[in-house]
Amino acid sequence: MATQKLPPGLHRDTLAVRTGIERSQYGEHSEALYLTSGFVQPDAQTSADRFVSGRGYTYARTSNPTVTAFEQRLAALEGTEGAIGAASGMAAILMMCMGLLRAGDHVVCSRSVFGSTLNLFAKEFGKFGVETSFVSQTDLAQWRAAVKPTTKLLFAETPTNPLTEVCDIRALADIAHAAGALLAVDNCFCSPALQRPAEMGADLIIHSGTKYLDGQGRVMAGAICGPNKYIADVFGPIVRTAGMVLAPFNAWVVLKGMETLAIRMEAQSARALTVAKWLEAQPQVARVYYPGLPSHPQHELAMRQQQGVGGAVISFDVKGGSPEQLRANAFRVIDSLQVMSIATNLGDTKTIVAHPATTSHGRLTEPQRQAAGIGQGLVRVAVGLEHTDDIQADLLRGLSQVSS
């Protein structure tokens, strides 16, 4: 199924609304949702040809028109040749690793990535003979020193979850390419509305569509964006064989979510900046992590890479003494909430608050958490679209109970 014909040079805000597959004979204005597990073939020879070539629609584990529309729109926003959908963001990373790595290969990965990503590289792929070296997100010398002759992949997310550390994408791309390796960047926190890693040399871009691409916390989805030589020729066979396929309904929900991505990211990021500045002034807060603040160690780099916007996720450390006291104070802040949600997702229009040390990074060992900088007093706030006065008042209920 072909892409709708559009004139060249359109802005990405327009592509987010208009990119899609050709309309059916019914002329639907909203993209169609194709809920079917199989597709009827006109004759036996066409069926045989389609199964051999992979072109056309035969079975939903192979392809689906709604999923194709999602993939085309996301690729247009990221500025890549193609994209391939997956059941979740972690399924997308799994697909990438299955397609690129084999026993004896080596990966260099930021130690600050999402907890499940750490486990996937260190434990799951470690069982199959893939070695991973974990390095500082921000220290380019460590990345260079970790590269080996067997290095096939450099992997980073930027900003990181939850400490919002920012890596230099272009510099990492240069390190990877000098070693004959690929650079993959998880663009979940910024989305293509704020950051396009392919423009800075990244080879592959990972997405959890569950987050900002959907934008309302409704469905699970993931994707890889990149050149067609990887999307079609490497990852296509993997998703068809292994079955980490994106459901058509989920693809349709995220497809519609992308239409409002830019304006949501603009509004939520503006609110996050207001809340981050307010948190810096609170006596119970030891430190605020937000790329939009001048106090952030990679503030200038973030502003260059993220179009001058800090994003919508803030983390902060509450004050306290021992790890037990820090955790108790963080729990006081979270348990006092009356407006915001206690949950572990992010990217929703509703503000979500989480305690990373016991949730997203709860399965890590204490040394792993310490290496990643995840303390017991850390609280993450994924800012939504509520009024900032109400967000601040909700946080203040708990901050006022913090003991030193």
Image (tube, helix red, strand yellow):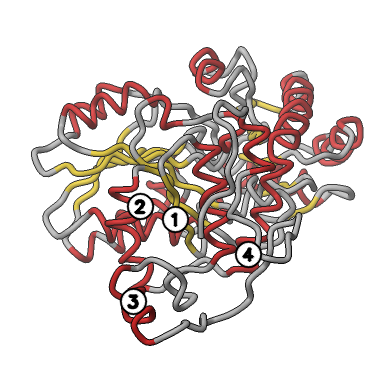
Q: Earlier along the polypeptide chain: callout 4 or callout 1? A: 1
**What x and y, as percent, mark residue 271?**
79, 29
Residue 55 visible in the shown view: yes
Q: Mark 3 points at which residue?
A: 51
**Residue at coordinates 67% horizontally, 49% vertically from top-left?**
354
Is residue 228 toward the left or the right of residue 258 in the image? left
- Mark 2 and mark 4: Cα distance apart in space: 20 Å
- Secondary-structure class at tag 4: helix
**Residue at coordinates 24% horizontally, 45% vertically from top-left?**
107
- Write down the quadrant of residue 234 in the picture: bottom left
Tag of residue 231: 2
**Residue at coordinates 30% horizontally, 22% vertically from top-left?**
140
For disc 4, the neighbor class at 10 Å (few under 14, some 14 to 19, many from 20) is many
For disc 3, the neighbor class at 10 Å (few under 14, some 14 to 19, many from 20) is some
Q: Name the residue under label 1.
A: 84
- Mark 3 and mark 1: Cα distance apart in space: 19 Å
* Circles 2 and 4: CB atoms closer than 8 Å: no
For disc 2, the neighbor class at 10 Å (few under 14, some 14 to 19, many from 20) is many
User: In terms of depth relative to the viewer, which is nearer, 70 or 103?
Assistant: 70
* Circles 4 and 1: CB atoms closer than 8 Å: no
**What x and y, as percent, mark residue 162?**
56, 40
User: In terms of depth relative to the viewer, which is nearer, 219 or 14?
Assistant: 14
Q: Quick one: quadrant of the C terminus?
A: top right
- Mark 2 and mark 3: Cα distance apart in space: 18 Å
Q: Mark 4 points at which residue?
A: 250
